[in-house]
């Protein structure tokens, strides 16, 4: 009779082990599924935010009318390609970005639109001796960042 009791106890222990293993396997599978979903969501976010590219061609210190307002949504990746026929500096206030320009060379401002609102671009054309003009000239373009 003692052999039968030992066998029953061993069987109970094995069944308990199997239940514990099943529980661990189920938990592990749930964690892996959650991880796969998180990775897929991150990839979708990264792929779902295409870069918005704009061109600004400064000619005699001015922009064409269709280049004066750049509209984006908060969170957008933004690339602004800038050329000028004269040397100078372009500043994007609020984002603290600037590009130093020389004729026939293209500069780029690359950033993520993180703050909503309207932010001015200012152009400071080079004066005598290659020095840029006075700070805080008139805004000749604007970045408009809309909330999502």
Image (spheres, grey):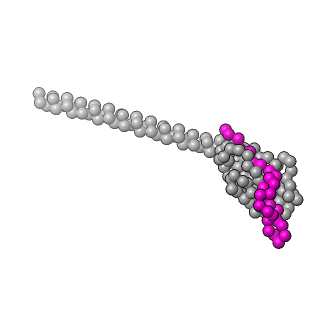
Q: Residue at x 86, y 48 (%)?
A: 65
Nearest the viewer among 50 and 58 is 58
Magenta range is: 122-148
Quarter of the figure with residue 145: top right
| Residue 107 visible to the viewer | no
| Residue 20 visible within the image | yes
Does residue 17 sit above or below 110 in this rendering?
A: above
Q: Where is 14 relative to 54, above or below?
A: above
Q: Quadrant of residue 19?
A: top left
As drawn, which residue projects farthest toward the right?
60
Q: Position of residue 11 (x, y in %)?
A: 23, 31
Q: Taking 126 as reference, is 25 above or below it?
A: above
Is residue 60 toward the left or the right of residue 114 in the image?
right
Classify residue 46 as left or right of residue 83: left
For the image shown, how many numbered marks are present on the structure? 0
Q: Is residue 131 magenta?
A: yes
Residue in the image at 65% along x and 47% along y: 114
Side (left or right) of 104 relative to 93: right
Residue found 84% across the figure and 46% down from its top: 66
Location of the C terminus (image quadrant): top right
Left/right of residue 19 with respect to residue 32 in the rendered view: left
Q: Is residue 97 magenta?
A: no
């Amino acid at each position: 009779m003692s052999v039968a009791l030992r066998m029953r106890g061993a069987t109970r222990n094995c069944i308990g082990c199997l239940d514990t293993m099943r529980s661990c396997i189920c938990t592990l599978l749930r964690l892996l599924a959650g991880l796969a979903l998180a990775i897929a969501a991150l990839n979708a976010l990264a792929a779902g935010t295409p870069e918005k590219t704009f061109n600004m061609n400064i000619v005699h210190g001015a922009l064409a009318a269709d280049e004066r307002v750049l509209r984006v949504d908060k969170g957008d990746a933004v690339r602004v390609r800038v050329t000028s026929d004269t040397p100078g500096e372009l500043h994007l206030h609020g984002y603290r970005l600037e590009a130093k320009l020389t004729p026939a060379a293209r500069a780029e401002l690359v950033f993520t639109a993180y703050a909503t609102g309207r932010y001015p671009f200012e152009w400071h054309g080079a004066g005598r001796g290659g020095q840029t003009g006075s700070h805080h000239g008139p805004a000749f373009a604007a970045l408009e960042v809309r909330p999502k």
